[in-house]
Image: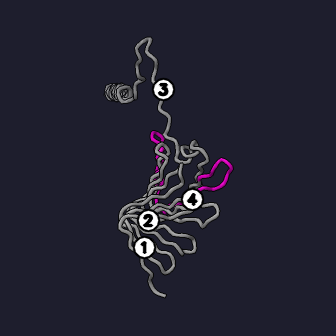
């Protein structure tokens, strides 16, 4: 009687082991079979970080939440900090950011600080676009601009805005449809139904 019980236990243990081996073989990942003469596909590399991507652009660096663009001599052209997130697309070389503060360094004149909810820098199109309600001002806030959106042309160093532009300089106020800030010529031009007034004393 004891020998039969012992034999039964051995048979059950053997069957459990065989089932476990079969299940393990079926569940284990199989190596991909490549037909002879066909090259194996390379493993896709991990996506580069935004810091690695931006480092490939000329004279552009990112440190924490700050991006800096310099000219060939190392002079800072503009700096930007963002409270929101950065996104960079290597395919079309577009940098996006949210809730930004962008400072344009202008030789021989005051810096211009731009604040906007949205920032898009396209290095193929050579322009930077600020949108969704933009304010721009000098550090002492003696000049203040407000507009729906603003475009900075990288090559000409001009700032262009259209639609509902308001400008304040000391006690003077102006409004118009189009604004051009020409940094090289050191000129500000407004056009399109311009209203100009002096406010206060």
Classify mark 3: helix, strand or loop. Answer: loop
Q: Which mark is residue 185?
A: 4
Between 163 and 4, which is closer to the camera in this rendering? 163
Q: Are marks 2 and 1 in contact (CB under 8 Å)?
A: yes
The residue tagged 1 is: 174
Q: Is residue 78 magenta?
A: yes
Name above or below for residue 190 compared with residue 17. below
Q: Residue furthest right?
A: 73
Which residue carries the number 3 mark? 42
- Sequence-wise, the earlier of marks 4 and 3 is 3
Q: In the depicted view, which residue is nearer to us: 69 or 61?
A: 69
Q: x%, y% of residue 198?
A: 45, 81
Q: Which residues are magenta?
A: 69-96
In this view, the residue farthest toward the top is: 37
Q: Earlier in the sequence, mark 1 or mark 4?
A: 1
Q: Position of residue 184 (x, y in %)?
A: 58, 57
Residue drawn at x 44%, y 55% is 129
Q: Earlier in the sequence, mark 3 or mark 1?
A: 3
Q: Earlier in the sequence, mark 2 or mark 1?
A: 1
Q: Under tag 4, what secondary structure?
A: loop
- Quadrant position of the N terminus in the picture: top left
Label 3 vs 2, first from the N-terminus: 3
Check disc 2 and report the residue beneath it: 190
């Amino acid at each position: 009687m004891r020998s039969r019980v012992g034999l039964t236990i051995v048979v059950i243990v053997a069957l459990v082991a065989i089932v476990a081996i079969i299940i393990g073989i079926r569940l284990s990942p199989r190596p991909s079979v490549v037909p002879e003469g066909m090259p194996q596909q390379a493993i896709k590399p991990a996506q580069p970080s935004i810091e690695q991507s931006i480092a490939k652009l000329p004279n552009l660096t990112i440190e924490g939440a700050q991006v800096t663009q310099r000219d060939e001599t190392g002079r800072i052209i503009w700096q930007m900090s963002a409270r929101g997130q950065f996104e960079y697309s290597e395919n079309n070389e577009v940098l996006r950011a949210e809730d930004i503060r962008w400072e344009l360094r202008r030789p021989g004149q005051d810096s211009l600080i731009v604040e906007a909810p949205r920032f898009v820098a396209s290095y193929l199109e050579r322009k930077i676009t600020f949108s969704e309600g933009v304010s721009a001002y000098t550090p002492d806030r003696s000049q203040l601009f407000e507009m729906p959106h603003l475009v900075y042309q990288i090559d000409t160093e001009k700032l262009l805005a259209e639609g509902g532009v308001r400008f304040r300089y000391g006690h003077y106020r102006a409004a118009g449809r189009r604004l051009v800030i020409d940094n090289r010529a050191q000129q500000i031009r407004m056009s399109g139904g311009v209203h100009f007034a002096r406010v206060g004393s």
